[in-house]
Image (cartoon, rainbow, N blue to C red):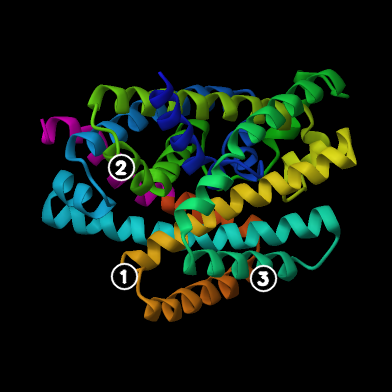
């Protein structure tokens, strides 16, 4: 049972930093559709559970050590090349969004220029990538349970302190801009995006477990856990949409309303989750083209992260609006491949 929960927790940890740690993603993908957004949450939960189970099962069955070998095994030479390219683009794109997110945290919580937070994040990521990344990411990944507790607290607080009725909040929520046309496509796009982000690491997580059924169960439970987090986060933002709609970090704003001390703790947790995702994305991106053990790889690390810093100046909210949906549409190639995967490798 412990191994199952460990795999589930690891899968959640891979997804949570990019998927909804700030709350901006939940606002765009679910809350902006009002009541119907909750149907999107249920659909996303089911897809996360199924695809999470498939990813860890395939990883265990192939005993994979990198996403490349598994993707080409599942998809074949030509489709595998496309999916591999999508994952590589996703790694860099999400890394840039995470740098911008660090800037937004510093701006909203400490009233400093976003560049300061982004620069700090880039420096930490570069230094970490030059050291032993596994230990550091493992420590930061342990923050996930604290995020879970905080989101549940925020949700309960929001429901009991809401100023308007659900009926009055619904049109306010629906007035929020979203680049997705409806709740159904939005839910599928959200899952597709997150699977594109987490596929590489989830396959490796599954590959580390020899028991295929145990690995699959861990991925399934992890998917359910992600869905529960989305549900609580969406409820929290919906019930206070009248006050957090314009915030880059809606969840952080809600915590600040409860207590400045909790707000500071939440900002540290969010920064840690964003760091976890950022270092994982850039590490996997550079590792795709260079051997990380060599000192000469430090130059590509610095160049990649510097380019990411410059690209992050576009702004966190704009990047979430356009980069995430675009990756979500591209990620459908991977989603269809994963649905077919169990039959392909049986």
Which residue is labeled 3 in the image?
Answer: 119
In this view, the residue in front, 219 or 164, is: 219
Precedes in sequence: disc 3 or disc 1: 3
Task: Give yes or no for residue 219 being in the magenta stretch.
Answer: no
- Note whether residue 238 is visible: no
Marks 1/2: CA–CA distance: 20 Å
- Between label 1 and label 2, give the one nearer the viewer: 1
Q: Position of residue 40 (x, y in %)?
A: 51, 27
The residue depicted at 66 percent of the width and 34 percent of the height is 146
Secondary structure predominantly adopted by residues drawn in magenta: helix
Label 2's element?
Answer: helix
- Estimate how packed mark 1 is, as few (under 14), some (14 to 19) or many (20 or more) residues with alpha carbons within 10 Å: few
Answer left or right for 22 relative to 84. Answer: right
- Note whether residue 90 is visible: yes
The residue depicted at 65 percent of the width and 35 percent of the height is 147
The magenta region covers 328-346
Label 1's element?
Answer: loop
Which residue is labeled 2 in the image?
Answer: 203
Q: Which mark is residue 291?
A: 1
Q: Position of residue 161 (x, y in %)?
A: 87, 22
- Estimate how packed mark 3 is, as few (under 14), some (14 to 19) or many (20 or more) residues with alpha carbons within 10 Å: some
The residue depicted at 81 percent of the width and 24 percent of the height is 157
Q: Position of residue 262 (x, y in %)?
A: 82, 38
Precedes in sequence: disc 1 or disc 2: 2
In this view, the residue in front, 269 or 37, is: 269
The residue depicted at 62 percent of the width and 40 percent of the height is 143
Label 3's element?
Answer: helix
Marks 3/1: CA–CA distance: 25 Å
Corner quadrant of residue 176:
top right
């Amino acid at each position: 049972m412990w191994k199952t929960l460990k795999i589930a927790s690891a899968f959640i940890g891979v997804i949570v930093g990019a998927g909804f740690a700030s709350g901006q993603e939940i606002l765009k993908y679910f809350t902006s559709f009002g009541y119907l957004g909750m149907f999107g949450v249920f659909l996303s939960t089911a897809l996360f559970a199924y695809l999470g189970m498939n990813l860890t099962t395939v990883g265990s069955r192939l005993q994979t050590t990198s996403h490349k070998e598994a993707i080409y095994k599942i998809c074949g030479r030509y489709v595998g090349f496309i999916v591999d390219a999508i994952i590589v683009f996703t790694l860099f794109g999400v890394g840039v969004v995470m740098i911008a997110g660090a800037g937004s945290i510093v701006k909203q919580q400490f009233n400093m220029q976003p560049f300061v937070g982004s620069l700090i994040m880039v420096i930490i990521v570069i230094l970490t990538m030059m050291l032993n990344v596994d230990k550091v990411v493992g420590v930061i990944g342990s923050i996930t349970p604290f995020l879970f507790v905080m989101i549940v607290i925020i949700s309960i607080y929001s429901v009991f302190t809401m100023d308007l009725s659900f009926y009055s909040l619904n049109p306010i929520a629906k007035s929020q801009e979203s680049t997705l046309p409806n709740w159904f496509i939005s839910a599928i796009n959200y899952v597709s995006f997150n699977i594109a982000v987490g596929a590489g690491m989830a396959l490796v997580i599954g590959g580390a477990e020899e028991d295929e059924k145990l690995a699959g169960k861990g991925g399934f439970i992890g998917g359910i856990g992600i869905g529960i987090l989305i549900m609580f986060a969406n409820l929290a933002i919906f019930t206070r949409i009248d006050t957090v709609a314009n915030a880059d970090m809606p969840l952080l704003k809600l915590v600040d309303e409860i207590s400045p001390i909790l707000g500071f703790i939440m900002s540290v947790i969010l920064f840690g989750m964003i760091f976890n995702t950022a270092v994982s994305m850039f590490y996997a991106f550079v590792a795709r083209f260079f051997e990380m053990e060599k000192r000469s790889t430090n130059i590509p690390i610095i160049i990649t992260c510097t380019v990411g810093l410059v690209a992050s100046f576009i702004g966190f909210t704009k990047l979430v609006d356009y980069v995430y949906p675009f990756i979500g549409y591209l990620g459908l190639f991977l989603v269809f491949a994963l649905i077919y995967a169990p039959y392909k490798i049986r």
